[in-house]
Structures are given as structure tokens and as C-alpha cells.
Image: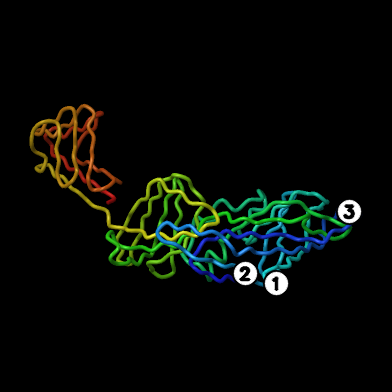
Amino acid sequence: MKKVFGIAAMLLALAACNKIETNVQPVENNEGIPFSATISVGNNATTKALAESGSTIVATWAVDETVALIHNGVKDEMTVSAVNEGVATITGTITGSPSDGDAVTVIYPASAADGATGKIKADLLHAQNGLLTGVGSIAANYDARKGTGTLKVNGTTASLNGNMTLTNQFAIFKFTVKNSNASATINVKLLTITIGAQNYVITPALATSELYVALPAVSDQAVRFSATGSDSKTYTCSKASVTFASGKYYQSTLKMAPPITVTWNNNDITGSGNSFSKDGVTLTAGSIDFDEKNFEENGTFTTTLGNFTKIEVSSVSFIGDIYGDGNGIKFVFTIEP
């Protein structure tokens, strides 16, 4: 689909219009029968942004684009054969012995469709290149829309029975990567977005500070970002309780910083009582032997610097508690600011 993009919300609808016929008969033809229908794009949508207001993303059809037509577990590809004032005519051959009234699913683009399930491919968004337009971009692969309806079969031709609306399945983001105080951009060569147990890996052809990403809608979830900069350093940030909707376009500035590393060597850990603090990290336990470096009775680590991503303890033994036993101990904390 040829697209004209502004900075905006995307919630696009497609409707199928068909000529009404009479004397409808089921057709049993494994070789397929001609299919033709018209579908249109609605360009008016509301705007919602995380960081700033947007305007509009406009989509227009292009001849030779393909959509998937799925029924009876069979996937057929239909081609946009003509475009007239935003209305596209799609044509092709429908197989699988179509009958009048059969349930049908239409998915754009055809490459996004899983013909066996009639759904968007489960792994479609897992690897992206950060582009809005061009080869391998959101416009080419991830501007996925889906609609359901029924077939209208008349003799030896088929169409859609009534109107069909195709709705966007994903949210689209423009991420701008900056340093922690947003005073400068960071060019990244890899961005990993983690939502729940799923990673979405964005690998631009060239390091850049602006990446366009399609993501599934979420409600009140934590999202973690990890980037590898053009300087090969790792930068991270997290957003808590995030909610965004399918069919919307969002802009978000990622204020990222390298992880903080705090190291406690054996001789650093001195004092008395049941807690020890150094460099923004505190260890608290029911009992601490500072000479032997033994920490017992439900110890905890806390930090004022951010969130722990890794805690490493070396030269110790573990028996439910942490025991240095006078042999030396070392803690290394990795913290996401």
C-alpha cells in the first residue's frame, strides 16, 4: 500500500461493497472461481500520543498490492487491480469450494496472514527494522488489518456479502532515543522491547535515534527497553503501567542511560548492626557478622539508584543465607537507573 504519512493516529477502516445478485447457488469447484470486490480506506481517526500531540497518518491503496482471503482453512491472495478515489477493486481466484454464506476473513497485507488459523501471524512483530516506509518497513509488513464477514457466491463468481470493515491490529510507535536528561540523542544499532515474556527486536540497517515500531495493544503492563548504541554501550530504561491501543499512533521519547555498576569488595564491608550501605545500595539482614562476612536471617538488598537487573556474589557459600566465612567476599550490583 502506498502511504502518505503525517505524525498522527492511525485507526483505518476498509469496507467491502458488492452488487446484489439473485438465484444464488453453492459452487463446488476445487479449481477456484473468480472473485471481485471493492474495499475502501477511511483516513479520519482520533489522535493519542504519549509525549506530544500528533496529526494524521494517511493511507492510500496502490495497484498490485495483495490481501489474504481466508475461508474453510484455505488462504487465497487477492490483488488490488484498480484504485479510484480511495476505493480499491480486489480481484483473484477463490478456491476451497466456496459456498454462499461461508465465513471469510480478510487480512492486509497478505504476507501477514496465517492461512491455517485465519489470524495474523503470531511472530509477525518479533523482528523489525525500525522503518516507517520502504523495504521491510511498517508500511510494507506490519500495518496489519483484519475483517470478518461472509461470502456471496452466485453461479460461477464470488464476492463479499455486504460491507466489511478491516481494523488495525497493532499500535505504531515512533521512538526517539535520548540520554537520561534528554539533552542529546543516542544512535542505536539494536533496540529490544520486552513486554511480559516477549521480546521485540528492532535492528535498523544503520544506527539511528528514531525508530518506528509496531506493537500489540497492552493494558497496564511494564515495558522494558534495552539498546545497543553506535558506541557499543548498553542503554536501558523502563516504563511502568503502560497502556496503548491498536490502531493508534504514539510518539515516545526513551530517556536511556547505561546500567550502573556498584561493587563491594571484601574490605569495603565493615561496621556493626544489621545493615550495611555503600554507593546507593543497602544490605539488611537479621544478623551480620562483619568479620566473617556472614549475612543471615532473611537478608534483603535495596537501592536508591533504580532497579536491580543483576546481583552477583563471589567467593561465598550458600546455605539459605550468605556466608563468607572469612574467606573473602565480593558483591557486584547491576542497576537500571
> Dot 3: what SS?
loop
- Quadrant (top left/top right/bottom left/bottom right) for the N terminus: bottom right
Question: Which residue lies at the image location 27% right of the left edge and 60% below the top edge?
Answer: 181
Coordinates of residue 217 in the picture (x, y in percent): 51, 50
Residue placed under numbered mark 2 in the picture: 60
* Distance CA(mark 1)–CA(mark 2): 9 Å
- Label 2: state its secondary structure: loop
Badge 1 marks a residue whose secondary structure is strand
- Circles 2 and 3, Cβ within 8 Å, touching? The answer is no
Q: Earlier in the sequence, mark 2 or mark 3?
A: 3
Decide which of tag 1 and tag 2 comes sooner along the chain: 2
Q: Residues within 10 Å of mark 2 (few under 14, many from 20)?
A: some
Percent of width and height locating residue 257: 28, 57
Residue 294 in which image quadrant: top left
User: Which residue lies at the image location 24% right of the left edge and 52% below the top edge?
Assistant: 260
- Numbered marks: total: 3
Residue 260 located left or right of residue 30:
left
Which residue has dot 1 on it? 83
Q: CA distance from mark 1 to mark 3?
A: 28 Å
Q: Position of residue 317 (x, y in %)?
A: 21, 34
Relative horizontal placement of residue 219, taking residue 264 as reference (left or right): right
Of callouts 1 and 3, the N-terminal one: 3
State the residue position of label 3. Answer: 24
